[in-house]
Amino acid sequence: MPPEPMTVPIISPALSLKPPVQSWDLMADMSKIVWFLHPGYPDGDNTLLTLPCLDSGGIHHETARIACAIYANCRWDGYLSSSKDGPVLSAQPDDVLPFGQYYFIIKDEPQYPVVPSFEHFVCPADLPDAYSQASIARSKGDGCVTRDETCRITASSFTNETAHIIPDSQKGWWKRNRMSRYTSAPDKIHITRCPENTILMRRDLHKLWDDGEICIVPKQNKWVIHVLTNTPKIELRERYHNLELQPLSGIQKIYLLCRFAMVMFSKSHFLSGGTKRKLIYLEDLESGSNIHTTKEFTSKAIDEKFDKTPARSGSRNPSPKRPRNDTVDDKVCWEESDYSQEYDSEREEEEERRGRSLKRRWSPDTWDEISPPKYHKTTNLAKRSGENVSPCRKRLRSSSPKTKTAEHPLTLTPDSIEFSKGLT
């Protein structure tokens, strides 16, 4: 008989399992809304902007003031008041304005003109103080991936992507405003994909960035995430609102300001009013001239001359694509044409330097029915063969209950925040 096998005793450590992540509340009370009004029009027909009270039950004073100043053609001398002809608020720039309504006032100019949309917005020659005082270091490397290394929001080293600050879809605006002058290659006037105009973000946050649900603003001389979405699903605001970014380097502050302007224009209510509007706009966008014209328009004239549909703030540059599946009711799908996934990104950046295009299918979930991508008539991607296309789905917006908030001092979330809520 063969000898019995010898058993060797081992000391096995106990297997350690992590508990499941606690679910976030999906039906919480939505935040109250702060209204910002134009003093030159009747109340009820003078809304410039509304913002949710996510800053400790209110809204960060300077963030709101800069947003209103952008509508007024970058009038940094404007101020907020609680009445149409009232004095400037006593609040400091980093104070929190409580729930209510405020007028954005420019001294001795009660009916100042308003920029109708981002395409008529001209990059300002100077920065507001909050942007000037928040620091950004010089670049440590040539490319975005080499420079940033990890997601600038979460410090994650996985599934990161290069996100545009000014998106490639705004090439016309970029060229007209000579934005390449702020880069290391000012002669390349068409190139938006440059280190100064890109930032590394984790894939899910890149989508939120492209959808205009988050932006980057200065608060207390630090760069933080500001959440713009008001939803009963509180995860986004609890995780990311006022979260201080990882150290930034090599990015131009002026691009962050213009990105903020682009997102703010996508949320403006001003053109929807019924009374005449005094607007400051570019008469001929095609000429490349940035000379503004001021004129009063009726509501009908605004409808005829200006597109009230907000432009997408995303860095994706979609082109139309017809699905070949007859069961999808002939809906239009979209394929992204200039989008870089930064996983294994050093290799991909090398491919771009050699002139090879990187293409990645654009998610249909990013199609917002309120601000759909523009259809490029000159591009017929349906002629391509061998590609499977799935039907697009419109993202539905949930209805919401009334709101409850509490007022506390503004608190910035440290960048070492623990994202897994409820772990023990």
Image (tube, rainbow, N blue to C red):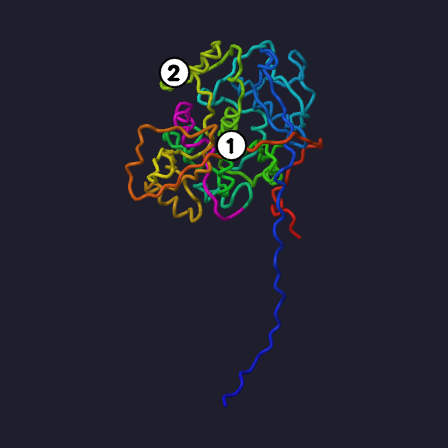
Q: Is residue 165 magenta?
A: yes
| Tag count | 2
Q: Say above or below: 35 vs 323.
A: above
Q: For the magenta stretch, what is the residue range? A: 156-180
SS assignment at label 1: loop
Check disc 2 and report the residue beneath it. Answer: 284
Using residue 30 as the reference point, say whether residue 74 is left or right of it: left
| Marks 2 & 1, CB-CB < 8 Å contact | no
Q: Residue furthest bottom?
A: 1
What residue is at 49 percent from the left and 22 percent from the top?
124
What residue is at 57 percent from the left and 22 percent from the top?
49
Among the 4 quarters of the image, the one containing residue 102: top right
Check disc 1 and report the residue beneath it. Answer: 212
Q: As shown in the figure, which amino acid type bears the numbered disc 1?
A: Gly
Front one among 299 and 424: 299
Q: As shown in the figure, which amino acid type bears the numbered disc 2?
A: Asp
What residue is at 50 percent from the left and 90 percent from the top?
1
Q: Position of residue 60 (x, y in %)?
A: 63, 28
Q: Position of residue 101 (x, y in %)?
A: 65, 20
Q: Say above or below: 108 vs 146.
A: above
Sort mark 2 into few (<14), some (14-19) or many (20+) by Cα contacts within 10 Å.
Answer: few
